[in-house]
Amino acid sequence: MSIHKSILDRQLFLVGDYPAVYPAGYSNPEQLVQWKDVQTCLNNPWWYNVEMLDNSNMKVPMPTVPEQWHDKMVPEKSVIFDLANSNNTFVIGKYGHHNRAVEDLLDEIETQFYVNCDAHVYGALGGASSFKIHWDQPANLIIQIEGETDWTVYNERCSTLIKYDGYPYNPTEEEVTPCITHKMLPGDVLYIPARSYHCARPHDRRLSLSIPMWHDPEYQSDRKEHEPAKGGNALDRENRSKTCWCLRIQEVRQIIFVKNTNEK
């Protein structure tokens, strides 16, 4: 397991739920996402949720086009790459099933805690800003993949009495007090409790992986690696029996067809 086992220690969460940073908490972070993966995702917006942020931390509206075989509208790829090449921050959602390393990590988290996870890739080709001080509904694990990012997690949280409407409140720095301030380097892991205020200030070119952990989930994801049947070995007994009978019937029909043809 590439993530340090202390990060997923259930004992840490039985009494209290606090932000924490784990320097070098994940070994070989490049196995989770590389720039070639980013290129694949940006080129396939029908499989992934792709968003772009401007230097004011606002989502950039992108023109969409219909995708015939996916029955939905997707952002124009030329616009996506124009914005990415202009050093805007990109956000790639639905990355949770991208490769085996990501799936294994999410599976390990879901085994330890009663949560359902996804993975989101954040990055930029050059100097770009990220979100302002804000809060998110689920708890998050942040893994720095490449580059450096200054992170601050604050003591304050938004109350559960406040409904999330897609536009969380952005407090000023005078309204909150820092709990953790850390420059994230590749392999560092940051834990952010649900609804905790936080912000990121990236340096130049960088990549990071955000893992939102939805507690008390309605559904669980199937991350088991399945394989197709090999020579019929993976078929159950009933299906094998049906398959044998179907083949036998085809053989009999072929014999009758050949016999009738020869008699003519």
Image: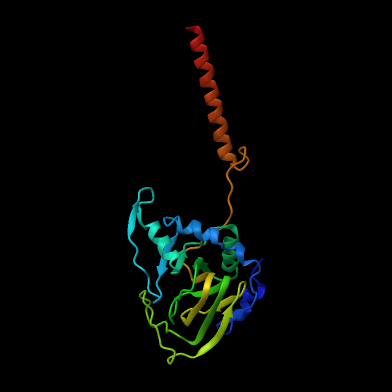
The answer to whether residue 235 is above or below residue 258 is below
In-front residue for pair 159/135: 135
Q: Residue 90: x percent and y percent?
A: 45, 67
Q: Residue 185: x percent and y percent?
A: 60, 75
Quarter placement of the N terminus: bottom right
Q: Residue 79: x percent and y percent?
A: 38, 60
159 left or right, relative to 115: left
The answer to whether residue 11 is above or below residue 88 is below
Marks counted in the figure total 0
203 left or right, relative to 8: left
Residue at left offset 58%, top offset 56%: 224
Residue at left offset 49%, top offset 79%: 201
The answer to whether residue 152 shows anywhere in this view is yes
Q: Quadrant of residue 109?
A: bottom right
In-front residue for pair 220/101: 101
234 left or right, relative to 46: right
Q: Residue 255: x percent and y percent?
A: 54, 17
Q: How is the image coloured?
A: rainbow
Q: Residue furthest top?
A: 264
In-front residue for pair 106/78: 78
Residue at left offset 47%, top offset 63%: 219
The answer to whether residue 237 is above or below residue 169 is above
The answer to whether residue 97 shows anywhere in this view is no
